[in-house]
Amino acid sequence: MTDHARVLCAEYVARLGPQKIRAFVQSLSPVQLRYLARYWPFWARENQLPPPGAWKTWLLMGGRGSGKTRAGAEWIRAQIEGSSPLGGQRCHRVALVAPTLLDAREVMIEGDSGLRRCSAADRRPVFSSSRRRLEWPNGAVAYIFSSEDPDSLRGPQFESAWCDEFCSWTHIEKTRDMLRFGLRLGTSPRMVVTTTPRPIEPLRQMLSDPLTVTSRARTSDNRLLPDSFVQEVESRYGGTLLGRQELNGELVEDPVGALWDRDQIAAAYCTSSPALERIVVAVDPPVSVGAKAAECGIIVAGVIRKADCAHAWVLADRTVQGVRPEAWARAAMQAYEDFEADEIVAEANQGGEMVRTVLGLANPDASIKLVHASRAKHVRATPVAALYEQSRVHHCGRFTRLEDQMCAFGAVEFTATNSPDRVDALVWAITSLVLDLKHGPRLRALI
């Protein structure tokens, strides 16, 4: 068999069984082996290869580390270099769009699964940071763009595009629209979209488009990840709403009737808080201990008041589960000391003065305020949810399990072992900081 014929056969190797693959590899010359090492269909999983058909958008929704970035990079490389030595170049002008320019460089271009890493040395593109472009030896050029600056997509035109982490884009709709106007070169301009999904309207629109084909990949699909990592994240997040989204790549829609939704919480994210006037640690104690016991919700939050308007910052979620009273009391007091809080606010419906006693033993000098709930959880939480709608509550970081509870609260039936204790503690914290002082006796009648 000639070298030329062997190259053609390599394109079908991925479809063979293990024994035939081994025999085929042993028959190859060093030159052919080097080619095979860069032939992506040989190594890729099925969900990392573009589906057949006359699609305009290939949407690859995947969990963290599922290999979606490598799939996007390899698709672009195939457009520029050809899918095989005999396939021929398809594109000369490409758009690479990321949440930020730094993301484009560090992930799409220079990352472990980026375009430069997955290219052979003699075909590796050169990145020009000043011109924001990637240039291949064959003359093809890829231009990088940020979702923070949609107008930079006005004017340029392309044959292909790769959109990475679409659901994390800043100006998502305008960036998408500007890119679509620019995809006008060649006979069939296409784009690949790689993202961890979020329940946002632009993603729903893309999914409903008849010219979109969709692939899905889970974190556990990537056999190159350390088993210890996969086991840890599966044990920690498996079965949660966050796990379904971040590990399985599922589009998790918010339950109907929930007081909060994920877009609302995402809008509350911030990187830090200003100097706060008052900080509290809110505690929702459990009534039992053990592996199946409810959690002890522990939320740290602070406030700034301006005139008649107060803004709250959620600083930490220190919730613990399955521990004895003295242990959750120590965890609460540790948060009290770490954040130099002004007060512990603890619900006493289940434990009465025992709650004060246990907390006092952990720190006799702490200021402790006991609160009693006289109304249903939903009624107490509704004014706090209204503050989120007014953009008056901010989250200093991602509190994933708290967010899962918030997005199910009001739509999911909670039980004694599946109680929204984090949300309860959040409600007590925000109520104490913002609503108690504003509404006085009228609010206290609700709680």
Image: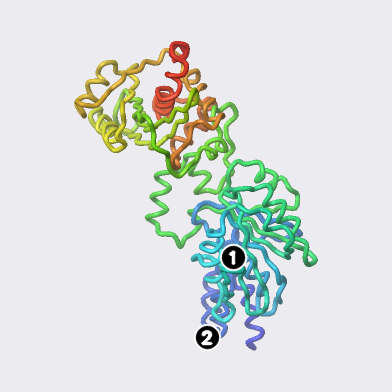
Locate residue 371: give its quadrant. top left
Q: Amino acid at mark 2?
A: Pro
Residue 436's place in the image compared with 395, above or below, is: above
Mark 1 neighbour class, 10 Å CA radius: few under 14, some 14 to 19, many 20 or more: many
**Residue at figure coordinates x 39%, y 37% from the top left:** 275
**Residue at figure coordinates x 66%, y 41% from the top left:** 201
Query: What element does badge 2 sit on?
Result: helix
Which label number is shown at residue 30?
A: 2
Which label number is shown at residue 73?
A: 1
Kindly tell me whether residue 419 is visible in this rendering: no
Which quarter of the rendered picture does the N terminus lie within? bottom right
In the image, which is nearer the foreground, mark 2 or mark 1? Answer: 1
Mark 2 neighbour class, 10 Å CA radius: few under 14, some 14 to 19, many 20 or more: few
Residue furthest front as drawn? 307
Which quarter of the rendered picture does the C terminus lie within? top left
Q: Amino acid at mark 1?
A: Ala
